[in-house]
Structure formats: structure tokens, C-alpha cells
Image: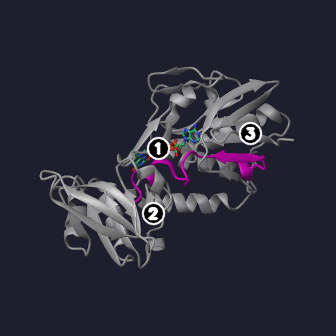
Amino acid sequence: MTEVYDIVIIGGGPVGMFAAFYASLRDAKVALIEALPELGGQPLALYPDKKIYDVPGLLGVTGRDLVTNLKEQMGLFKVDILTDTTIINASRANDLFTLTTDKATILLAKTVIMATGKGSFEPRRLQIEEASKFEGVGLSYFLSQPEVLAHKIVAIVGGGDSAVELALAVEPYAKKTYLIHRRERFRALEQSVKQLENSQVEVLTPKKVTGIERRANGQLQVNLSHIKEANVTENLLADQLIVQYGFISQDQVIREWDVAPERDLYGVLVRENFVTSQPGLFAIGDVNSYPGQADLIAIGFGQAPEAVNAAIRCFDPDRGGPGHSSSLIIE
Ligand SMILES: Cc1cc2nc3c(=O)[nH]c(=O)nc-3n(C[C@H](O)[C@H](O)[C@H](O)COP(=O)(O)OP(=O)(O)OC[C@H]3O[C@@H](n4cnc5c(N)ncnc54)[C@H](O)[C@@H]3O)c2cc1C
């Protein structure tokens, strides 16, 4: 029989991760579901190396380090985590939510907390026919640990912050790092471009990838052509090709759920304790909308315990709490 969760949290960005931890701290049976192969949401996918200064208690933390800390915190108690899984429908019958995944599985939940940000993320893919064949076997769109590419030949494609920063992060470990971009100039921060110029990364511009082939030794042959002179071509050999064209986020799947909550132009409308128009369904972080809402991590972190505590009151009204071990008694 499919097990029933007290709380399923949809979206493994910072807000969903903290909500999952807090739910586990309150001993709820909790699952966290994330569309991407890695937890982390916007900070990991969009700005892993930028320093965040407005999270309390952290004196400038990179997106990557914040996510690592949140993962570690979640490891303290039991949270069931499913990555690479998108919730494509939510329905409700007999006080239970049924959540359908894109992997044709279902989850049952007494309450659901949406922490879906601006929608599920998907990388912008390389637009060549054979790209999908190499995805996961030499071609990737995501890298959270540059050190796994130690002693490898790595080719990175893209011209924005994420491509330049990834090339700089990989270069100290890799045997050789290439950065391929279709324009002469990079759109990254000036300081990052300066660092790139002073690094060992070999920059190949203005060039685009026109094909990928597998060599007998397992390496990829990446075919390039000059943007302005298509007949000027070259090939390079690489162990790993990483495309950094950014991510697209789309919340269409959520709009089509059977229990689609009411929304306005900015997101899902919430009332007290961040409950939506659907009883038992909460929305926290960037996904929600109310007067004065702001898309900030600290704000989503504050909403998480409130929604979790309210969710617990839905299925266990007598539990009471939350308390903490050092609660003050005011006389
Ligand atoms: C460039 C940039 C810089 C920023 N800098 C700061 C800063 O300095 N300080 C600050 O406080 N904020 C900053 N922000 C905003 C901050 O990143 C967001 O407020 C924060 O990420 C919101 O967290 P979240 O968990 O609500 O959503 P997200 O981080 O968007 O995470 C949502 C997650 O839900 C997943 N998801 C969505 N739909 C589904 C589904 N149906 N099934 C499964 N998974 C799903 C997505 O894949 C995603 O991983 C910045 C944002 C950007 C873009």
C-alpha cells in the first residue's frame, strides 16, 4: 500500500528545504520533491557563486554553500527526498491529496506545501539533433561539484555569468578547460571576465557547437564552426561537455492541477499561515502572492515554520506546540 505522508513539500529550493527540515524537527512524516536532479532551486541553479548578504547569521554566503548547509541541516532528521521528479497533478479526495509525478508514480499526503518558486526549472538545451543522445553520458547542463572533473578535459558552452564562473571553478581541477561562446564578449561580471583573462581557460569565440561524436576511446569530439565564417571549422576532444545557457522556469504544470489554487498575476494567493484557497494546501516562498510580498530567501524561511505548524494542526489538532526545549515561561 502506498504510504501516506503527513506533509509533502513540492520544490527543493531553499524555502522548501528549510520547510522539510522544520517538518522533520516537528516529527512529521515528510517528503520533499524536486524537479531538477539537484536540490537547491534558484541559488544553486542561477547564482551558485554570488554572495548572499541578507540571510540572518551568515556573513555573505554563496548560493552553493547555502544549499550545502541546508542539505546538511536536513540530514539531522528523516526527510524522504525525491529529485528529478516533477509533480504534474494534485487532486484531493477523502481528506487526502494524491500527487502524480512525471515518473508515473503517486504520493499520498494529508497536507501539501508548495515551495515551487517561479515553477519547475529546466535547462535551456543545446539545439543540435544529437544532443539528447549524449545527455547524461558526456553532455550535461548542471555541475554542483567541480572537483569531480579532476584531470578531465572539459568544454563549457555559454557566455553569461554561470558559464564564466563554472569555467573558473572547474579550471583548477581539470586537465584542460575550454570555454566556447558565440560572441566575442562575455556577459558576465567584469571581475569574472578579468579573472577569466588571467586564467588557464582556453576561450574559443565567436564559435558555436555544430555536432558531437563519440570517439572509440569514449571521449567526445565536439565540432565547432566560426559564427561569421561557417566554413571555418575545428574539432576538440573533451571528456565532458557542459552547456550553460541558463534555465527556463514554467509553472504551467501547476496551473493544470485538479486542485489548482487561486492566483493573481504574481503567484498563488495565500491567507493566514500561508494557506491557499484549497484547505490543506499551503504556498510559501517565491510562489505565493499577498500585498507586500517580496522574493527573498529570508522571507520564505520565515514562512516555512508557520506553514508547517499550520499543516500539523490540520491533521493533528491536539498536538499543540510548537515549543522549544528552552521555552521561556512568562509569569
Ligand atoms: C540572480 C538572482 C539573485 C538573487 N539574489 C538574492 C539575494 O541576494 N538574497 C535573497 O534573499 N534572494 C535572492 N534572490 C531571490 C531568491 O533566490 C529567491 O527568493 C529564492 O530562491 C526563493 O526560494 P524558493 O525555495 O521559494 O524557490 P526556488 O529557489 O525558485 O525553488 C523552487 C524549486 O521548486 C522546483 N519546482 C517547481 N515546480 C515543481 C514541481 N511541479 N515539481 C517539483 N519541483 C518543482 C523548482 O525546480 C525549484 O528548484 C535572487 C534571485 C536571482 C534570480
Precedes in sequence: disc 1 or disc 2: 1
The range drawn in magenta is: 23-50
Q: How is the image coloured?
A: one colour
CA distance for labels 1 and 2: 18 Å
Instruction: Give the x, y percent position of residue 299.
Output: 51, 42
Residue 68 seen anywhere in this rendered image of the structure: yes
CA distance for labels 2 and 3: 33 Å
**Circle 3 — which element?**
strand
Q: Nearer the viewer, residue 93 or 17?
A: 93
CA distance for labels 1 and 3: 22 Å
Q: Is residue 296 above or below residue 153?
A: above
Residue 143: image quadrant is bottom left
Q: Nearer the viewer, residue 102 or 39?
A: 102
Precedes in sequence: disc 1 or disc 3: 3
Give the residue drawn at x 52%, y 52%: 40
Instruction: Give the x, y percent position of residue 328.
Output: 73, 51
Residue 203: image quadrant is bottom left
Can residue 26 be found in the magenta stretch?
yes
**For the residue marked with disc 2, what is the amino acid?**
Gly
Q: Which mark is residue 138?
A: 2
Farthest front residue in view: 216
**For the residue marked with disc 1, what is the amino acid?**
Glu
Asked whether the residues under the numbered discs 2 and 3 touch, taking CB atoms below 8 Å apart as contact, a structural biologist would say no
Q: Which mark is residue 122?
A: 1
Can residue 154 be found in the magenta stretch?
no
Q: Is residue 257 above or below residue 207?
A: above
Q: Is residue 186 above or below residue 273?
A: below
Residue 158 seen anywhere in this rendered image of the structure: no
Q: Which residue is mark 3?
A: 107
Quick one: quadrant of the C terminus?
A: top right
